[in-house]
Amino acid sequence: MKVDHEHFMRRCLELATMARDQGNTPVGSVVVLDGAIIGEGIEALPTGSSITGHAETLACQAALDATGRRVLAGAVLYTTAEPCFMCAYAIRQLRIPAHGPQPKLRPDVCDACERLVYAACGGTRLIA
């Protein structure tokens, strides 16, 4: 099955626009499992009340809540920014594998830093 990475990244960009429009840092993230979005997150900083209001952690929490799972092995996280160390730790604990920018690998953590779909995930790879 061919995965439409661009579709998921475009949704991230829509979420990032929503974050920006709310006065927050423009970051949007989605968690995808079996080709379906199971969690979305928009950056809730600096206007939110939680210091962990990063789009990646919010998307992961939404995915956990939606599925009732304790881990997200097999899921793919798409995000418009490279995950910070806090988010990277959460991603690792949830067992979302991290792969680099090589198109031949399945990108389990995709960000929009360098290209629309395949981008460097160095922050995640450093502690994974």
Image (cartoon, grey):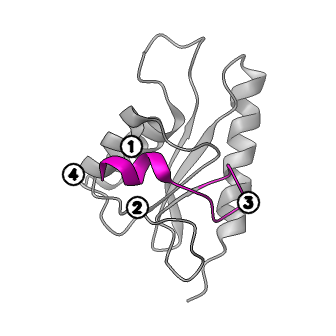
- For marks 3 and 1 on the same chain, the one whose residue lies earlier in the sequence: 1
Residue displayed at 73% across by 32% down: 18
**What amino acid type is highlighted by mark number 1?**
Ala
Query: Mark 4 or 2, which is nearer the eye?
Result: 2
Q: What residue did someone put label 4 on?
A: 70
- For marks 4 and 1 on the same chain, the one whose residue lies earlier in the sequence: 4
In the figure, residue 101 lies in which quadrant?
Answer: bottom right
Q: Count residues near mark 4 (Cα–Cα under 10 Å), then give few for <14, some for 14-19, many for 20+.
A: few
Q: What residue did someone put label 2 on?
A: 98
Q: Quadrant of the N terminus?
A: bottom right
CB atoms of marks 1 and 2 within 8 Å: yes
CB atoms of marks 3 and 4 within 8 Å: no
In the figure, residue 33 lies in which quadrant?
Answer: bottom left
**What amino acid type is highlighted by mark number 3?**
Leu
Residue displayed at 66% across by 74% down: 4
- For marks 3 and 4 on the same chain, the one whose residue lies earlier in the sequence: 4
Q: Which mark is drawn over residue 116?
A: 3
Which span is picked out in magenta? 111-128
Q: Is residue 61 above or below residue 52?
A: below
Which of the pair 97/43 is nearer the observer? 97
- For marks 4 and 2 on the same chain, the one whose residue lies earlier in the sequence: 4
Query: On the picture, is 26 further left or further right than 109?
Result: right
**What amino acid type is highlighted by mark number 4?**
Arg
